[in-house]
Image (cartoon, rainbow, N blue to C red):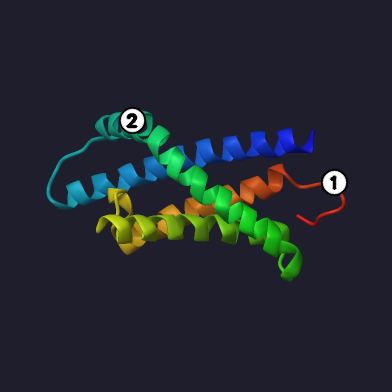
Amino acid sequence: MRIVRLLLAFVAVVAVTSAVSVAIHSQFVMAGLRGLGAEIGGGMALDMTLHDVAGMAPLYAMFIGVALLLGFLLTGWLWPKVKLARTVSFAIGGGAAVALMLTIMSTALGIIMVAGARTPAGFAAQCAVGALGGLVFALLTRQSSRAPA
């Protein structure tokens, strides 16, 4: 039963993390366009964001899923050895996993494929969403009284 709960929590976290990451990517891209003089109203911004989420999130979810899986496995192994709360450990693990994924993409391809992560603020925002995913995963998978949140 625990494995089903872990799997469902992981799938939910990957889906939400991917969708939010793509939505944030869209906002950074639109901010760049606005900086170049493009006029993007609220309705158009919403349409662009929804279009990006529908089109990009499924593919990005595969990358996020692999990154978070490796990050959470490493965090689960390291957590008992460190003196941090489980939620903090998984938040760090999720953020670090996304940072590593983006860095590997950049190194392997010569460019960060997620345009909204090409600036330091955009990169940090993507990592923050990974950290939030790790935090949510830790909360969804915590055991009753055996493991501190």
Label 2: state its secondary structure.
helix
The reply to whether callout 2 and callout 1 are in contact (CB within 8 Å) is no
Query: Where does residue 66 sit, x and y in percent of width and height?
Result: 50, 46
Label 1: state its secondary structure.
loop
Q: Going 53% across and 40% down the picture, which residue do you hit? A: 14
Look at the image and tell me in which quarter the C terminus lies: bottom right
Q: Nearest the camera: 135 or 4?
A: 4
Q: Is residue 9 left or right of residue 123?
A: right
What amino acid is at disc 1?
Ser
The quarter holding residue 76 reads bottom right
Q: Going 38% across and 59% down the picture, which residue do you hit? A: 104
Crowdedness near tag 1: few (<14), some (14–19) or many (≥20) residues, C-alpha within 10 Å: few
User: Which mark, by number, is residue 144?
Assistant: 1
Q: Nearest the camera: 7 or 88?
A: 7
Q: Residue furthest left?
A: 37
Query: Where does residue 41 sit, x and y in percent of width and height?
Result: 23, 35
Mark closer to the chain start, 2 or 1: 2
Q: Is residue 120 left or right of residue 71?
A: left
Eyeballing the image, is 87 above or below 42?
below
Query: Where does residue 53 sit, x and y in percent of width and height?
Result: 37, 33
User: Which mark, by number, is residue 55?
Assistant: 2
Crowdedness near tag 2: few (<14), some (14–19) or many (≥20) residues, C-alpha within 10 Å: few
